[in-house]
């Protein structure tokens, strides 16, 4: 479904505000995700302009995966069943909010 930037940011606002590692900002160039490393007190990556709402949604889903797996040596391919369940539950929470923003057709 074709979401807007605003819908995605609004749906994931609880996740974004609760994260110690990311922020999503609207700039005059477009939307960017800032990746912050609290241990270093600096940004972990150079911000890139996000071109489409779909790209923003994918980035946020990937952030959830990274949050769940951050203290493990796992990546998504070798995540445990419990980790996959947590990723799915967190993602579903925000996708349910997002899906509720579109009026029924």
Image (cartoon, rainbow, N blue to C red):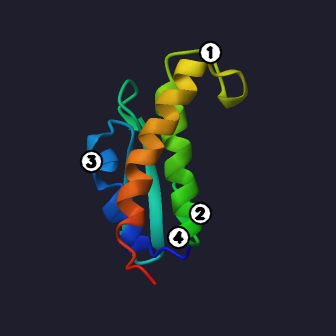
Residue positioned 66% across, 26% down in the render: 75
Foreground of the two, 98 or 105: 105
Pointer 3 local density, CA inside 10 Å: few below 14, some 14–19, many at least 20: few
Which residue matches tag 1? 73
Residue that lies at the very extreme toward the right in this rendered image:
77
Which residue matches tag 3? 17
The first of marks 4 and 1 along the sequence is: 4
Residue positioned 27% across, 49% down in the render: 14
Pointer 2 local density, CA inside 10 Å: few below 14, some 14–19, many at least 20: few
- Alpha-carbon span between mark 3 and mark 2: 19 Å
User: Is 56 placed left or right of 74 in the picture?
Assistant: left
Residue 53's label in the rendered image is 4
**In the structure shown, which secondary structural element does the residue marked by tag 4 occupy?**
helix
Which residue matches tag 2? 55
Note whether residue 68 is visible: yes
Residue that lies at the very extreme toward the front in this rendered image:
105
């Amino acid at each position: 479904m074709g979401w807007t930037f605003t819908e995605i940011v609004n749906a994931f606002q609880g996740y974004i505000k609760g994260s110690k590692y990311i922020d999503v900002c609207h700039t005059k160039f477009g939307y960017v995700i800032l990746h912050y490393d609290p241990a270093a007190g600096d940004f972990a990556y150079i911000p890139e302009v996000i071109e489409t709402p779909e790209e923003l949604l994918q980035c946020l889903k990937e952030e959830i995966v990274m949050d769940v797996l951050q203290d493990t040596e796992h990546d998504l391919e070798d995540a445990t069943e419990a980790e996959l369940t947590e990723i799915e539950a967190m993602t579903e929470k925000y996708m349910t909010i997002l899906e509720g923003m579109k009026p029924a057709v």
